[in-house]
Amino acid sequence: MVEYGSIPQTEPQITDAPPPPLRSQLTAELIGTAILVQVGCGANCLAIYLGVLDGMWQAAIVWILGATLGLYSSAALSGGHLNPAVTLSFAVVRPADFPYANVLPYWAAQLAGAFLGALTNLIVYHEAILSYEAKNGIVRGGQASIQSAAAFGDYWR
């Protein structure tokens, strides 16, 4: 039987490698956030406009996939924040690791990435959106248009 004290203690390996350039970090945040929004809201588009997904759990699984892909694509360079609240939290809680000066550039990259992901969905699902609105008698700007816009955001009643 191996005793607890017999396991050798190892020190964490700390590298003195410089962090990636800010431009690379921001590009990673933009790409990661775009993937998250495109895949996640894409699931909403499939569920709402095409009726492909049976229930909310299926959309949630696709959101998890989107978050995983977004994190894997960005974490090594930027930390994979993908969310302005996470970025602010890192700056507040760990200012030595993530300086306040990076908050606004990260937010801009995340906003741009989210916009690109949503724009991709708008282009891909444009015909499905028009068909859904025509089928349900939805006029854009009217009260019922929230049903159509729901794939691109959260609308709580």
Image (cartoon, rainbow, N blue to C red):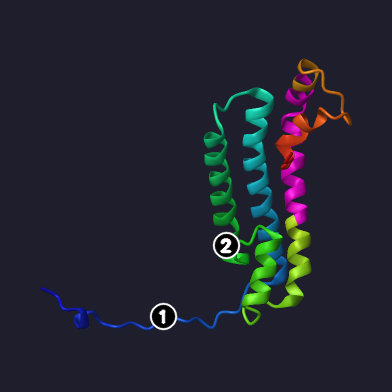
Q: Is residue 32 left or right of residue 54?
A: right
What is the residue that sits farthest to the left in this orientation?
1
**Quadrant (top left, top right, bottom left, bottom right) of the N terminus:** bottom left
Does the segment drawn in magenta span residue 17? no
User: Mark 2: which amino acid?
Assistant: Ala
Residue 55 position in % (x across, y down): 55, 30
Asked if residue 45 is positioned above or below residue 128 in the image, the reply reads: below
User: Mark 1: which amino acid?
Assistant: Pro
Asked if residue 60 is positioned above or below residue 91 in the image, the reply reads: above
Q: Specify the segment rendered in magenta.
A: 111-131
Residue position for label 2: 75
Residue position for label 1: 12
Give the structural element (helix, strand or loop) at label 1. Answer: loop
Residue 77 position in % (x across, y down): 61, 65
**Disc with the residue nearer the chain's start (2 vs 1):** 1
Residue 87 position in % (x across, y down): 68, 66
**Quadrant (top left, top right, bottom left, bottom right) of the C terminus:** top right
